[in-house]
Amino acid sequence: MSSVRTLGMTACLVVLAVLGLGEAATASTANDLVTERGFYVDADGRASIESVQSASFEPFGPVLNAGYASQPYWLRLSLPAGEVGGPSWVVRVLPAWHDEVLLYDPQFSNVPMRLGDAAPVQETDHRSLSLSFGIPQSDQARTIFLRVDSPHSMIVDAVVVDQVTAARMDQNGFSFLAGYLGFLCAIFILSFLTWLSDRERVIGVFCIQLVAAIVYSAAMYGLLRIWFVPPLSPSLLNLLTHAMIVVYPSTTLVFYRFFYCEFGLSQWVARSLDCLVILNGFSLVLIGLGLVGLALSINAVILLMAALLILLAPWFFLRPIEDRASPLPPWTIRLSGLILGLPALVGIIRTLDLLPESQAPVSLYLFHAMMLSIIVAMVMQYRSRKRAVALEESRLLAVK
């Protein structure tokens, strides 16, 4: 059980690292210069900067979470007076998965700056995991506008900070994501080596799920954009990001389907998970046809149903298999389902705008994914060892 103890120690280190970075991020957010925020949904997609300046904006807090929307939406950020000629301020927009973000600064120009997956990276001189714009300071209080076009969801965190704070936030973001991806890679290597020893199906599916998690995280949090644009075109990266939003949770569903079946999952639940994965494959077809908003909405509904099944299955839908000794105590199965199902359920509900008042930072989702990886990897290691012991006992009995 040395590998399990190693993973347990790693879990403690991960918790400390996340708490430290979370504290640093909170300190950086405290330097946010925005005095007031508002958002406005562009119902027909034709609003101009001139028309939105007189539109009625709905106020929101530090993070906008208004569910899915196929229409573009505008953010209005009020800024205090600054120092003329001083260092430029940085407008940071997170997450970085938006197709296009236009920044208008009417006090200086009505010609927008443009960033996003559908925009050339060369239009900004500030490269980071966020979409970041540089704007000049002014000796008068002013209002800037962001037009956001994204089929994913109306979830955005927009702050305006000085360059020192922006650099610190970028460094924290890179450190956190690098540690997270490195951790996933370590879990993958450990699980892959375990799979090589006995070619166990569940562990093999878990390895595939980890690969999908690594690509998904790198795409969703802007790392692929920094690494591969150019030579890859932004439109191709945009397509990959949309696809991974569907592929990654689908691989997770496949893993849990096989994992629970090892403990006597009810056949109708297994078939239901199979159907949900197949239906989610239809979302990939819609993405290929350019119907991204519809595809991701279907994906969210499917994941909502799947999260309920994963959450409830360990408690109500597992049946003991008489001819197979359970390699794990029941609490480990229930804990893994609880850790995945409950946060996923809350996350999907808030993405569908059924729980708009619930706002969680991106780092919380990364923390949840890390803890899930730790527990599932511990479960896999324990399961593999128990299986090896059972095989050895069978071999000794056969010899006798």
Image (cartoon, rainbow, N blue to C red):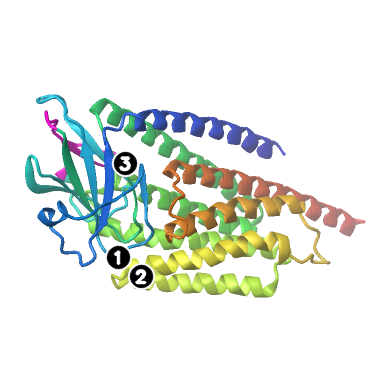
Q: Nearer the viewer, residue 380 or 173?
A: 173
- Residue lying at the far right of the rendered structure: 400
Residue 135 lies within the magenta run: yes
Give percent across and percent down for residue 27: 39, 28
Q: Give the spatial CA distance, label 1 vs label 2.
A: 8 Å
Q: Work out whether residue 328 can be spotted.
A: no
- Label 2 neighbourhood size at 10 Å, few (<14), some (14-19), many (20+)? some
Reading the image, the residue beneath label 1 is 70
Give percent across and percent down for residue 74: 23, 53
Q: Is residue 112 left or right of residue 31?
A: left
State the image quarter where residue 261 is shown.
Answer: bottom right
Quadrant placement of the N terminus: top right
Reading the image, the residue beneath label 3 is 129
Query: Which element is circle 2 on?
Result: helix
Per the rendering, the mark at residue 216 is none
The stretch of residues the image draws in magenta is 123-140
Mark 3 or mark 1, whichever is nearer to me: 1
Per the rendering, the mark at residue 294 is 2
